[in-house]
Structure formats: C-alpha cells, structure tokens
C-alpha cells in the first residue's frame, strides 16, 4: 500500500480535475489547506473557475510540464490511463500516485468512515447525510458526485468525527474504502463495462459490505431483494439495519403525502413512531432517500430534532429533478436519470407535479453498452411522457464500435412500437433550434441524461435573449 507524503504543507496535482468526484476532492483539500494544481481536457466550468479563485492552478489539456517538481502527490480520475504524460512524469520523478478512490480512502482513515453506495440515490442521500452531520457538528468531511443547490459545493471539510463518501461501484473503486458505517441503497444491473452479469455485481457489493467494521453497522434497503441477499452473504459481524416500506424493515416509511412544495413522510424506527418528516423535494424515491439518511444518522447517534430540521431545510442537488425556469410559458426541468428505473421514477414524479400538462422528454442515452443492454427496459420507461425526443448516445468511457446515432435510432423505433410519440435528433444543436419553435404555453420540457444534455436549456435561453 502506498501512503501519501505527509508534511506540514501538503500539495497534489489532480489529473482529470473537472470530473465530479475530482472536483469534490479538490474542494475538500483546499478547505484543508492543500496547494493544488490540476489538468483536464475539458474547458473549465463555473465550478472549476471558483476553485481557480481559491488557488487551484489549472491547465487545460495534458502535458508532462503541467506536473510541477514540487508536487508531493498525483491523483488521477478513473478516466486517466497510465500512459497519460503527467502520470508518466510522476513515475520518472518518483511522485506517489493515487486513484481518486485511493486518495479518498487515505482521507477517510483520518476519521470514522461512512460509505453510501447503490445503483440509485447515492448522491442525494450522501448530500442529505453530510448536511445532517454538519448540523450536528459530526462531519469531518465529505465528497459526493453532485453539487448542492444553494452553496454549489460537492466537497467540504468539517471538525467532526465522521467522513462521508459517495461510494461508486464503477471499476470496483468502492473496495478501496473501509467504513464503519455502510449504506447500500439498491442494487440493479448497471456499469456493464465492469459487470457483465448480476452475479459479478453482487460479488463486488458483497465484498464491499464485508469491509464494514465489526463495531459499525450495515444499512440496507429492505425493499431490494438483491441488497438483502448481499447483506446475508457479507462476511462482517457488523450489526444489520434495514430501511424501506416493508413491514420487516427496522426503519419504515409508513405514509407519504405529496404537495406543490414537496412531500412529507411518516417514519417508524425500531418500533417507535417518530412522526412526520418534511422534505422540500418531490418523488416517492426521495422519501426513501430521506428515510435512509435519517436511519443512518439516527443509528450513528444524531438526534431526531436535528434530523427533522435539516431534512426540512435541504434544498437538493443539481441535476436531480431540478427546476430550471420558465420560457415562453413552458416549464423546464433537468434530471441526471440515465437508467430505466431512474427515468421511470423521474417521469412519474414530474407527472404528479404537473398533472395533465403535456410533457416533452428530451433524452440523451449514456453509454452505448448500457443502452443496448437495457434497450427493452428503456423502451418501457417513458409512458408518462407525451412525446420523447432522443439525442445520439453520449458515449462515455468506451470504444465506439457502433455509431451512437444508430443506437438512438433503434431506441426511437422501439419507443414508437410501445405507442410513444418519439423522434430522433442527430445533434443537440438540432434539438435547440427545433425546441425554440416547438414550445407552447403550458407545456413542460425535461432534459434527461448523464452527459451534456443539460446545456440545452442554457443554449436555448441565450437564443431567446
């Protein structure tokens, strides 16, 4: 095991710093007084510009000269190969290298680790847990894969004892963590470039759960059969705690009431009725995210009063059923959904919010392998939309053997076969120009996907101006 250089003044170079996790890590390390440089092929976003204002030395593109001789550590994102020139220079200079998850694990060892994993809900639940622990003065630090609405932060440091990490199963990176408290929110087939079948996915989650410290607890979703199976197979003596809607769960949602301003849910925990918890978010899935956050923090010793107050004030995270604004009398939302289950939940939530108003869903599939593997499931996930516009697949982290537009055309055909009014577009630019004329007062547009589909709204508003 390689350990990072420990000195009074610490420094690191972050390769791929514009990625969500890497940016969160940069925010955390800057909070803790580190000197940072970083590089990325991407143009710096508003979030990176804020980090530059705080002292990050940013280089666009990758070159050996971007790694200064004074750098004590190099941290790279999962997308950065060993052949990267900055990583090659680090080898030549004998500078220790860490993957993103290895660096987070190093920081976690300085506190008590809290890991939140699962196919759905990781970012929102991690943000909720971090907000609750901050309010309780228990947070040592957090890294998550999305920005908090309001502050715009995705990583920050605190003075408490608990370090919280959103823990992704991609490339088995969550196996770098050794938490005391672990939450598994759900397990469904995904990341097919890493897990060709459900058994390989279950195996990784079982190993991850087994790394929970004996003196801690493993929180699992009682409504998810695969999560229950993983809990049974996990080789840890950590206490098991469950949440969900099933009567067998330790922490249960008994009722959910939704309104224009969000929702509230009634919680029964360990046999006691704890009453109603308000949440300024929409969707039954967010009630379960809130329940998971409440159960984890309560089991870790946080008072119910702090739980209730913090969840009531929680504003959510960007790109999760985010209301962007209104143009020409048409409402605009944006969501990160890129898995059939998430697509279905988001559209169900939107339908509950807007009632009978016409919903136009603009969907950008994410990854060719995911889209082709789950093609049937995707085609059956858009029933709440009145029309679906399909963009070419955003082919992230994969060698393209099939043209992205061909896969999206096939999805469009299958949606049409399901009776959905679906239309294929060859580019985001074509969508923007068409949408400008298609908007009507009273209709609703939601952009959806994990790629760059969120630029639609911003480019549209620039055209309107």
Image (tube, rainbow, N blue to C red):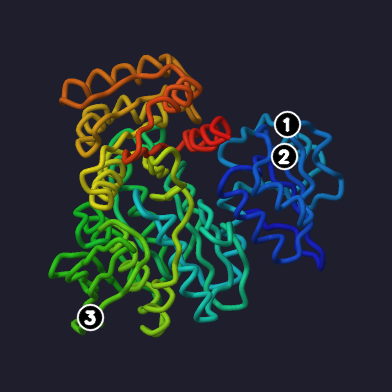
**What percent of the width, then of the height, locates residue 90?**
76, 40
Up-down: is 383 above or below 186? above
Mark earlier in primary sequence (1, 2): 2
Q: Nearer the viewer, residue 310 or 227?
A: 310
Left or right: where does residue 431 sit relative to residue 356? right
Q: Which residue is mark 2?
A: 39
Rendered location of residue 218, percent (x, y): 34, 67
Q: Is residue 331 left or right of residue 127?
A: left
Is the Cβ of the residue at disc 1 closer than 8 Å to that at disc 2?
Answer: yes
Rendered view: 406 above or below 176: above
Nearer-N-terminus badge (3/2): 2
Q: Residue furthest right?
A: 69
Q: What is the x, y in percent for residue 411?
A: 29, 22
Would you name the residue on which mark 1 appears? 61
- Vertical placement of residue 149 versus 451, above or below: below
Query: For mark 3, what is the residue?
Result: 270
Mark 3 vs mark 2, CA separation in Å: 48 Å
Q: Residues within 10 Å of mark 3 (few under 14, many from 20)?
A: some
**Residue 335: in sight, yes or no?**
no
* Crowd around label 2: few <14 · some 14–19 · many ≥20 (10 Å): many
Of 246 and 360, nearer the camera is 360
Whole-number angstrom distance, CA of label 1 to CA of label 2: 6 Å
Q: CA distance from mark 3 to mark 1?
A: 53 Å
Question: Which residue is at 67% across, 54% downward?
Answer: 26
Q: Tag 1's secondary structure?
A: loop
Residue located at (71% from left, 47% from top): 49
Number of the label disc, if any, that sits on residue 95: none
Question: Residue 172 placed where, x, y %?
Answer: 45, 46
Q: Earlier in the sequence, mark 3 or mark 1?
A: 1
Q: In the rendered image, is residue 307 in sight?
A: yes
Secondary structure at badge 3 equals loop
Residue positioned 41% across, 42% down in the render: 332
């Amino acid at each position: 095991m390689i350990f990072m250089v420990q000195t009074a003044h610490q420094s690191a170079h972050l390769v791929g710093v514009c990625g969500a996790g890497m940016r969160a890590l940069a925010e955390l390390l800057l909070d803790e007084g580190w000197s940072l440089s970083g590089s990325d092929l991407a143009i710096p976003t508003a979030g990176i510009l804020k980090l530059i204002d705080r002292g990050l030395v940013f280089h666009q593109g990758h070159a050996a000269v971007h790694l200064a001789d004074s750098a004590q550590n190099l941290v790279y994102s999962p997308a950065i190969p060993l052949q990267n020139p900055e990583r090659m220079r680090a080898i030549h200079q004998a500078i220790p290298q860490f993957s993103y998850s290895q660096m987070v694990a190093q920081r976690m060892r300085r506190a008590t680790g809290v890991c939140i994993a699962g196919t759905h809900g990781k970012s929102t639940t991690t943000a909720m847990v971090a907000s609750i622990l901050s309010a309780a003065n228990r947070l040592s630090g957090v890294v998550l894969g999305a920005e908090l609405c309001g502050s715009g932060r995705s990583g920050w440091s605190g003075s408490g004892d608990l370090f919280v990490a959103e823990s992704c199963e991609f490339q088995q990176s969550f196996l770098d963590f050794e938490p005391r408290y672990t939450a598994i929110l759900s397990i469904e087939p995904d990341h097919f470039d890493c897990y060709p079948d459900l058994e390989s996915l279950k195996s990784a989650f079982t190993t991850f759960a087994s790394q929970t410290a004996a003196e801690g607890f493993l929180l699992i979703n009682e409504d998810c059969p695969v999560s229950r199976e993983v809990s049974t197979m996990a080789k840890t003596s950590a206490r098991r705690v469950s949440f969900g809607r099933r009567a067998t769960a330790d922490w249960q949602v008994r009722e959910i009431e939704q309104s224009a301003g969000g929702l509230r849910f009634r919680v029964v925990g360990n046999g006691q009725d704890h009453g109603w918890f308000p949440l300024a978010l929409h969707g039954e899935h967010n009630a379960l995210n809130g329940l998971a956050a409440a159960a984890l923090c309560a089991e870790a010793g946080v008072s119910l009063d702090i739980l209730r107050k913090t969840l009531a004030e929680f504003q959510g995270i960007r790109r999760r059923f985010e209301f962007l604004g209104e143009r020409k009398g048409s409402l605009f939302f944006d969501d990160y959904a890129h898995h059939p289950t998430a697509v279905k939940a988001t559209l169900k939530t939107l339908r509950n919010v807007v009632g009978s108003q016409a919903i136009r869903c603009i969907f950008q599939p994410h990854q060719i392998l995911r889209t082709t593997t789950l093609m049937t499931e995707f085609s059956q996930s858009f029933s709440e939309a009145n029309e679906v516009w399909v963009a070419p697949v955003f082919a992230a982290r994969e060698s393209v053997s099939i043209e992205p537009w061909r896969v999206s055309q096939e999805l469009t055909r299958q949606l049409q076969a399901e009776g959905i009014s679906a239309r294929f577009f060859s580019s985001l630019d074509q969508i923007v120009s068409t949408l400008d004329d298609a908007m009507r007062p009273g209709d609703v547009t939601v952009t959806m996907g994990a790629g760059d589909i969120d630029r639609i709204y911003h480019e549209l508003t620039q055209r309107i101006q």
